[in-house]
Amino acid sequence: MPVILEPGADAVVAGFDVPLGVPAAWAAQAGIRSFRDLLGLLGDPAWPELLEPAESAGQVGVRRPFYPRAPGGSRRDQLVQGLRLASADDLLRACDRPVPGVMGAASPVFWLVGAQQVGKAAISAWREVVAPAAAAHVRLWPFDGDLPGMVAAGTSVICECYPRAAYEWPLGFPRTGWSKRRQADRRARAADALAWIAGSAVPVRPDRGMRAALDDGFGAAPAGEDPFDATMGALQVIAVLEGLVPAGPDPAMPDAQRAVEGWILGRPPQA
């Protein structure tokens, strides 16, 4: 990721579709006061299993929170018990919770099975990109301040984004009746996105290759959902930077909670 790790003349804002933050209930048990503090523990000999998924329920603990390494016989309540939490609700960050009528709850960062799990990507991203970047010149949103104050010439900022949030706000896609795994549906939603670009006057001009991909629905294979999501997530970041969508977090969130949980950039507000 040289565009992130090497400072240049321009500002760079990179959105990662992985959790950047941990649930406050677990952080309190672990004695962690900020996500940056957690990143500093990677490689600490006192926390050798922080990113090592537990193979059995008996191995789950406050200092080994990811579970299970492989599916088969695992239950979410085993994770709750191992982390000494009060309920499964404590596995979620505030930004992971559902927005009624808009989007469902996200999968908990520490839970590693199921079609919606995000923990494996978080482990890789934290270890390989986020921690090295945070130890260099890169700023982390919202942990290092408000986004407008961080974006300046020569700076790089990493934030958490969620393309599903962009579908609703600002792009205005239909809530039901389509699937990003179908080329025809991706093509229709890409047309909606192009109409939003034209109507909102954002400074976006797809080049020939991107326009062809949008018009084509990103190919016939189901894997076309990945570049589709990346494109919609990028539009979400642009909408926030242009002031069309508030970045967040919820103003009511206490500073101590935001420091460990973070926020999803441009997440739709509660309906």
Image (cartoon, helix red, strand yellow):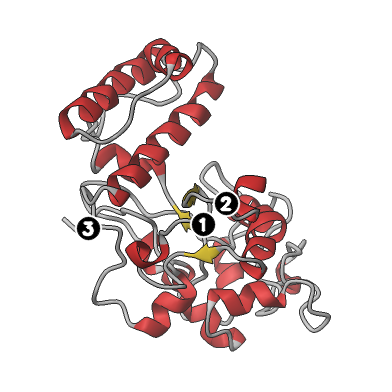
2 left or right of 153 in image: right
Label 3 to label 2, Cα distance in Å? 34 Å
Residue 234 in the image: state x and y as whole percent.
41, 39
Is 145 placed above or below 206 here?
below
Q: Which of 156/18 is in front? A: 156
Residue type at tag 2: Gly
Circle 3 residue: 269
Is 12 placed above or below 27 here?
above
Circle 2 residue: 8
- Mark closer to the chain start, 3 or 1: 1
Label 3 to label 1, Cα distance in Å? 31 Å
The residue at the point 37 percent across, 12 percent down is 215
- Disc ID at residue 146: none
Q: Is residue 192 among the parts visible in the rendering?
A: yes
Q: Residue furthest front?
A: 9
**Dot in front, 3 or 1:** 1
Element at label 2: loop
Residue 194: image quadrant is top left
- Mark closer to the chain start, 1 or 2: 2
199 left or right of 237 in image: left
Residue 84: image quadrant is bottom right
Residue 29 in the image: state x and y as whole percent.
57, 86
- Mark closer to the chain start, 3 or 2: 2
| Crowding at mark 2 (Cα within 10 Å: few <14, some 14-19, many 20+) | few
Is 34 placed above or below 212 here?
below
